[in-house]
Amino acid sequence: MLNTTSAPESGSRKISPLAWVLGLSALFFILFLIVSSSLYFGKSRYGSGKDFSTTGEGSVAIVELNGVIMDSKSMLKRLKSLEDSKEIKAIVLRINSPGGAVAPSQEIYEEVKNYPKPVVASMASVAASGGYYIACGTKKIFANAGTITGSIGVIMEFANLEKLYEWAKVKRFSIKTGKFKDAGAEYREMQPEERALLQGMIDNVLGQFKAAVSEGRKMKMEDVTAIADGRIFSGEQAKAVHLVDEVGTLDAAIKEAAKMGGIKGKPHVIYTEKKKKIWEVLMEEQSDSEESRTNRHWLGSLLSSLLGLPESSATLRAPGVYWLWNGSN
């Protein structure tokens, strides 16, 4: 019997699904290399082996404080690394942060306040609450006209899920050693004496915030108290109530820092950060630095927006006392 099946023409040959997958994978890999290479060739981190020997009469280092403050180790390490440099005469602390946890903010503030070289604050989009608190430790504060700053206040947040547990037929309880040990528990209504206890604690922390503002800004305590109700200010408004010294750009802050550091003429500017490789950003899951937390939060925000999921920084917040402005408080 003759085989009448004709051989398929070469021009009508179909590409197999496997070939499509391999081709697309290769394309994405090439794009990955291009993007990661562009991220790699960024700004050099001071102390990474790059020679910053003196070319003039001194340098001003830019140290960036970005995102929600949950840890101080990374920032303290960066500041310590610049302390002994004879080349660097002054620091500009570029703040773009809504604040964060109280204790790390206090640690950074103390380091900045007692730093052996002049530190000038330059506020970017947001320098509020804990971000503003840290700025109070610097010698001079610059804000852009539209910077969001202020938010002098303390916040703790709780949720009462008692009805939800009832609906889900879940019973939660505590075995405790004192009546306040489970204050703030989400499975029951907060009692008045528990609320009073927690309010007293955050009032004490607010007093610490106000004292730092009063000292750093050389303001009377009653003047600080009058605006220490959590309100935010634009940069222009903040200058009017003496929360910042000047409305000016990063360049203006650099010039002032150079002047304070005794640098004559145009200073050499050192950016102490480097752009990370994309795989470094994605592999920072185990890092506890505020920078890596910000990176993961950004990636989470991106995924949430792509998937159409609601996102609130409050839902991502660990239990604790915060100097934080998130747009809803």
Image (spheres, rainbow, N blue to C red):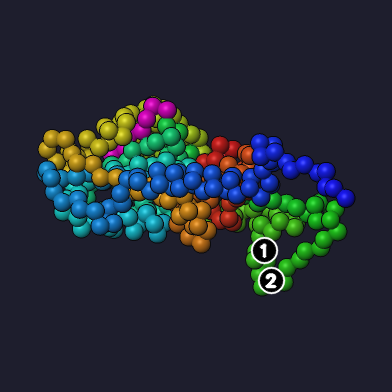
Residue that numbered label 2 is attached to: 176
**Image location of residue 246, percent across then percent down:** 30, 31
Q: Is residue 127 left or right of residue 86?
A: right
**Image location of residue 185, percent across then percent down:** 69, 59
Examine the residues drawn in magenta and state their main secondary structure.
loop
Hey, which quadrant is residue 83 in on the image?
A: bottom left
Q: Is residue 68 left or right of residue 243?
A: right
**Image location of residue 89, percent across then percent down:** 18, 47
> Eyeballing the image, is 78 above or below 266?
below
> Eyeballing the image, is 236 above or below 141?
above
**Image location of residue 59, percent across then percent down:** 19, 45
Q: In this view of the protein, which residue sits in the foreground, 326 or 311?
A: 311
Q: In this view of the protein, which residue sits in the foreground, 272 or 321?
A: 272
Give the amino acid at mark 1. Answer: Asp
Cα–Cα gap, marks 1 and 2: 7 Å
Q: Are marks 1 and 2 in contact (CB under 8 Å)?
A: yes
Residue 62 at least partly seen: yes
- Magenta span of residues: 137-146
Secondary element type, mark 2 = loop
Could you tell me which residue is drawn at 88 percent across and 50 percent down?
1
Could you tell me which residue is drawn at 19 percent across and 50 percent down?
52
How many residues crowd around disc 1 within 10 Å: few (fewer than 14), some, or many (20 or more)?
some
Give the amino acid at mark 2. Answer: Lys
Sooner in the amino-acid sequence: mark 1 or mark 2: 2
Residue 182 — which label?
A: 1
